[in-house]
Amino acid sequence: MVLVDFLPDTPLVNVLVVLVATAFIWVGSGWLETSAEELSEHYGLPPVVQGSIVVAVGSSFPELASVVFTALNDVFDMGVGAIVGSAIFNILVIPALAGLAVSDDLDTNRTIVYKEAQFYMIAVSALVVTFALAVIYNPVSGTAGVDLLGELTPPLAAIPLALYGLYLFIQWQDVNDHEAAESTVEQVGRSWLLLAAGLALILLAVETLVGSVESLSQTFGIPEFLAGVTIVAAATSLPDLLVSVRSARVGKGVTSLGNVLGSNTFDLLVAIPLGVLIVGTVTINFAVAVPMFGVLTLATVLLFTFLRTDLSLTSLESALLLVAYLAFVAWVVAETLGFSGLIKTV
């Protein structure tokens, strides 16, 4: 990592770099959010599309950058871990905090429940199938001859990308059916410049963050995947948290939840495949990835169940989502310390 090569490679310095990089990611994502909202208003996008596409892609850029940089530095497991960990954080913590941030229940609608949530569950399944195909058709022998490693190639990466293309087509249909109000945005060029500046700042910050986390994981013997699930995931999820909580506070529950589901859909179907396309081929550990995707699936079903009841998220349901995330963190710590053996290494 170029930006950290000039600093002492000590745990204290790396921790400070992680904190500073996280702060810059927060600032850059704020610029992205502001510009995305202005551009959505100018081009007349409906709230659900604004949340699930424009704002979601903007707030997901840290995760996308983390996958690209981990792939380029041959620590792709950390990037996949960051995506999955961020997705679990987004599904459990962000809706919970957004629900607790409002005085009443966090309202949703049938579009969120029956389109966004269900399509997102399809996205999770599609990525698991893609990983399985990599192990079946491009196996890499692990220890003791166990073939639980596989090479993810560009043709396989095209599967989730094609599914995201279908997602964009569905959203495009919603845009055509929407009657937008007159735009009050006067300086569209400024919004595009702010968007570009936010992307550039996030790129630099994530590059630095990934380098420091990689060094910390080597120093303390933390597996790359688990380092991604915890440290990188938490840092890159902050923009999504900021966007969703603020949207909920101003009465935009649909935009808030649309951002969560749209961000996760983008991360799974675009961010991971893009890392593969940039590098060419990457090796994935099916034995490590699948248990994490199992947790993500359970978290998604839990959120879907809560949203389906009365098309709202109550304070009690929000608290239960937080409890579920704390249980997930406890399990990750147990795996790291060797107290749990659900994640198999090869």
Image (tube, grey):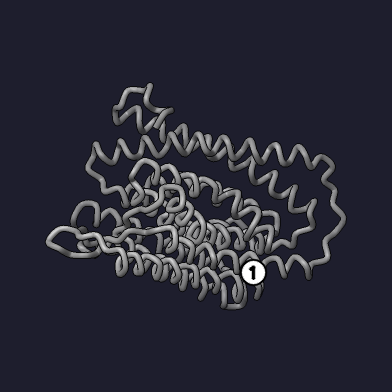
Which residue does the image show at 59% across and 65% down from the upper left? 165
Specify whether residue 46 is in view.
Answer: yes
Q: Position of residue 36 (x, y in %)?
A: 69, 48
SS at mark 1 in the image: loop
**Residue placed furthest toward the left:** 144
Given the image, on which type of amino acid does mark 1 rest?
A: Thr
315 and 143: which is toward the camera: 143
**Quick check: 67 above or below 323?**
above
Which residue does the image show at 85% across and 48% down from the upper left? 184
Which residue does the image show at 68% across and 64% down from the upper left? 48
> For this view, does 255 lie left or right of residue 77?
right
> For this view, does 328 lie left or right of residue 126?
left
17 and 94: which is toward the camera: 17
**Quick check: 46 above or below 215?**
below
315 and 237: which is toward the camera: 237
Crowdedness of circle 1 by 10 Å Cα count: few (<14), some, many (20+)?
Answer: many
Location of the N terminus by quadrant is: top left
Specify whether residue 340 is in view.
Answer: no
Q: Position of residue 75 (x, y in %)?
A: 33, 45
Q: Which residue is mark 1?
A: 108
Which residue does the image show at 50% across and 56% down from the upper left? 267
**Residue placed furthest toward the right:** 182
> For this view, does 38 lie left or right of residue 313?
right
Q: Position of residue 275 (x, y in %)?
A: 44, 50
